[in-house]
Image (spheres, rainbow, N blue to C red):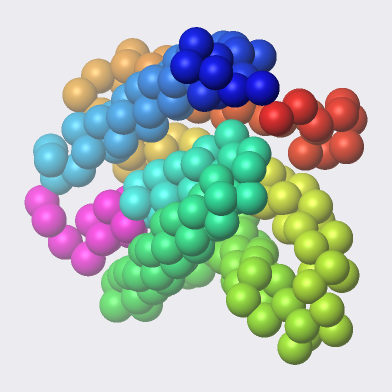
Amino acid sequence: MTTESTPLLNLNVMKIHSRESLKDKASVIVLNAGLLLFIGLVVSVLVRLPFNLFTYHPIFMILFVTCCTEGIALLQSTRTTQEKKRGLRHHAIVQVVGYISAIIGFTAIVYNKVVSDKEHFTSLHGQLGLALFCYLFCQSLFGLLIAYTPSLIFGNVATAKRLWKFHRMTGYILLVLVWLTAQLGVRADYMISNLWSEKLMWLHWVALLFVIVGIVARIRLWKWGITSPPQL
Ligand code: HEM
């Protein structure tokens, strides 16, 4: 029976919430610190160079890497139906912005090589970038189809919902490839030689470590069916 002195919220739920949100808040700080450090290091190179067609590549790729990472992070902690609905909307917006940035960044570097008459996809970074670009198209298309046209494509919503786990799994694989490609990009000779001091390259490892810790700390094992979901 509810009386004047009964708390409106179940205390156990409140405890779960406050404990999780503390861990979540810490992981967001660590993740954003890593992203900021990564962005800062790339921008610190760009400001030392004359602005040209190449500049669009790292600028838009930074935006893409950021959107891709944040877009995943914001969905990781969703639990209730309401949170999932809101999270999905934000995830879709952020990933679409990221995808458009990737198209601009990709076009800029390919066009830059066309006008300067250079060979294409010669480095590991360039080859991985091309593969990633194709993967990104499939990942985005699949995500949009299961989210917004579930019955049309997959027959019914229940079947589409069962496919979410594949989108989640391939999304994490994509994130690993995104960071691998970006790390190879920042290690291109042109980027290293224009860093204020080459000795600062170790800071890229710090940035990467922070991002990994931030993302891994937010993974919910119950969403993978490894543990049972928390009681609300
Ligand atoms: C944000 C960090 C990044 C930096 C600093 C960067 C830097 C560079 C540099 C210096 C080049 C020219 C040298 C080379 O061909 O290896 C290049 C080429 C290339 N990058 Fe990036 N990159 C970054 C992120 C990405 C990402 C995330 C992708 C994935 C789509 C990507 C895709 C490519 C491709 C496909 C080429 C080769 C284009 C061609 O050969 O026509 N880059 N990048």
**Can residue 61 be seen?**
yes
Residue 181 left/right relative to 222:
left
Identify the residue at image location x=34%, y=51%: 63
Identify the residue at image location x=71%, y=71%: 146
Q: Nearer the viewer, residue 66 or 88?
A: 88
Q: Nearer the viewer, residue 7 or 140?
A: 7
**Magenta residue check for 213:** no
Q: Residue furthest bottom?
A: 152
**Can residue 207 be seen?**
no
Report the predominant secondary structure element of the magenta stretch. Answer: helix
Identify the residue at image location x=14%, y=45%: 49
Q: Nearer the viewer, residue 4 or 101?
A: 4
Q: Is residue 136 above or below residue 229?
A: below
For the C terminus, which image quadrant?
top right
Q: Which residues are magenta?
A: 50-60
For the N terminus, which image quadrant?
top right
Residue 213, percent across and down?
57, 19
Quarter of the figure with residue 190 = top left
Identify the residue at image location x=56%, y=56%: 85
